[in-house]
Amino acid sequence: MTGRTRTFSQQDMDEFGIASGGTGLIHTEPEYAAATPFGATLVQGVYLLAVIEQQLCELVPAWADRGSADVAFVSPVTEGAPFTVQITDDGQGGWTLLGSTPGGPAVVGRAWLRGPHLRE
């Protein structure tokens, strides 16, 4: 198992939003987000997935070329909350993915390698 924790700042989310187009108010406007049920800005889901993918590439270099993943976003990650990624060999040729905050799971899923000449 591998795991690493990252905390996202508002500046991180603003910069990622500009680069990715994920500039919705819930991600980039703290005053707006404070008035929502979440109470704070939310980290973009694609940003969370990118952090998970970076760790997959470090763990399994071939994943960069042949990797696939199926994930679900099960709860939000707010600005300033620690986000811990755990990647565990599932014993079936793939990996179980868990991204969590102190409040519980935020991203869950599975990753695997496609065949070298296949697009599964």
Image: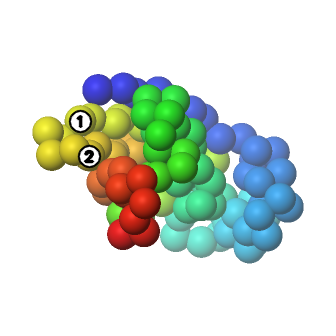
Vertical comparison of 97 with 84: above or below? below
Q: Position of residue 104 (x, y in %)?
A: 32, 46
- Disc 1 secondary structure class: strand
Q: Residues within 10 Å of mark 1 (few under 14, many from 20)?
A: some
Q: Position of residue 17 (x, y in %)?
A: 78, 61
Left or right: 104 in relation to 5 = left
Say whether marks 2 and 1 touch (CB < 8 Å).
Answer: yes
| Residue occupying the point 28% across, 43% down | 95
- Classify the position of the N terminus by image quarter: top left
Q: Which residue is mark 1?
A: 89
Q: Nearer the viewer, residue 40 or 20?
A: 20
Q: Residues within 10 Å of mark 2 (few under 14, many from 20)?
A: some
- Classify the position of the C terminus by image quarter: bottom left
- Disc 2 secondary structure class: strand
Q: Position of residue 75 (x, y in %)?
A: 40, 61
| Residue occupying the point 44% across, 29% down | 59
Q: Earlier in the sequence, mark 2 or mark 1?
A: 1
Q: Nearer the viewer, residue 109 or 26?
A: 109
Left or right: 35 in relation to 78 = right
Look at label 2 and name its amino acid.
Gly
| Residue occupying the point 47% across, 40% down | 62
Residue 91 visible here: yes
Vertical comparison of 73 with 94: above or below? below
Spatial CA distance of label 2 from label 1 is 6 Å
Residue 72 disc label: none
Q: Which residue is mark 2?
A: 94
